[in-house]
Image: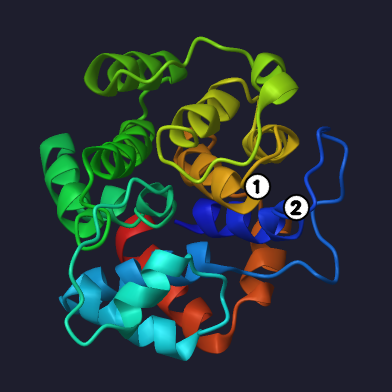
Amino acid sequence: MLGAIAGDTIGSVFEWNNVKTKNFPLFSTDTCFTDDTVLTVALAEAILTGTDYDRVMRAYYYRYPQAGYGGSFHDWALSDAPAPYSSWGNGAAMRISPAAYAYDTLDEVLLWSEHFTAVTHNHPEGIKGGQATAAAIFIARKEGSKSDIRHFIEDRFGYNLSRTVDEIRATYDFDESCQGTVPEALTCLLAASDFEDAIRNAISIGGDSDTLACITGSVAEPLFGGVPESIAEVVLGKLDPHLRGVTTDFIAKYVR
């Protein structure tokens, strides 16, 4: 979960100012959390408290109204009778990481990730993106290898993970879909040597940088043995007391 928040936070300054290089500063004065973090922490709180995710998401929307939500999510959160809106957007995958820690089997993770995703993103591609991300995190949690992740994701979800980061970077542009974000994020992960390298890979391809790095970071955390302390300390310092408190509570109960 902290890996997702780190990726979002580091990527926040590059979403509308893409860099096609791995040589960039991890943090600046403008670095901040975005809706990716807000909705990730909202899911963590929903799991911790046993509260319906839709209720918690709407409460967080009102608490953090300027976090950078998409237009459809704005409409959903403001609706008197919110209903799933058949989205295939990458918001399905950016917020799902807590589900991969709260359950003990892959089948449970797949079931609950579909449940949490379908609150808004009930399009098949949205469900697929959320499930694929959660599954990759879970496999890494259980000490699965990069090869284990690659084979399961390709076989179960049909994503193409055979490209190189350089090949993606050459032509990649802004893409808010799950199908145009999750395979790229996982490719950046599989090509990495450590957590920081995974984040740098994700941001270097351009596009929706904070969400790409959020998804990549969510899997990189368990795959590479956690978020480096030097990064974690800065990232937690960028959160307000409420987000930090829920994050540390969730980590204490489910991650450590």
Give the residue number, with chain letter if any, for mark 2: 14
**Residue 229 occupies quadrant:** bottom right
Q: Nearer the viewer, residue 196 or 200?
A: 200
Q: Is residue 95 above or below residue 156?
A: below
Q: Check residue 112 in the rendering and tell me which mark sits there, or answer none.
A: none
Mark 1, residues whose alpha carbon is within 10 Å: few (<14), some, or many (≥20)? many
Q: Is residue 223 above or below residue 46?
A: above
Q: Residue at x 82, y 41 (%)?
A: 19
Mark 2, residues whose alpha carbon is within 10 Å: few (<14), some, or many (≥20)? some
- Amino acid type, mark 2: Phe
Is residue 51 at all visible to an observer of this figure?
yes
- Residue 2 image offset from top left, x and y in percent: 51, 58
Query: From the viewer's perspective, is 219 left or right of 46?
Result: right
Q: CA distance from mark 2 to mark 1?
A: 6 Å
Q: Is residue 140 above or below residue 74?
A: above
Q: Residue at x 33, y 16 (%)?
A: 154
Give the residue number, with chain letter if any, for mark 1: 209
Query: From the viewer's perspective, is 105 left or right of 149?
Result: left
Secondary structure found at label 2: helix
The C terminus lies in quadrant: bottom left
Query: From the viewer's perspective, is 61 left or right of 2?
Result: left
Do callouts 2 and 1 mark residues in contact (Cβ within 8 Å)?
yes
- Amino acid type, mark 1: Ser
Q: Residue at x 35, y 51 (%)?
A: 92
Q: Residue at x 45, y 35 (%)?
A: 182
Secondary structure found at label 1: helix
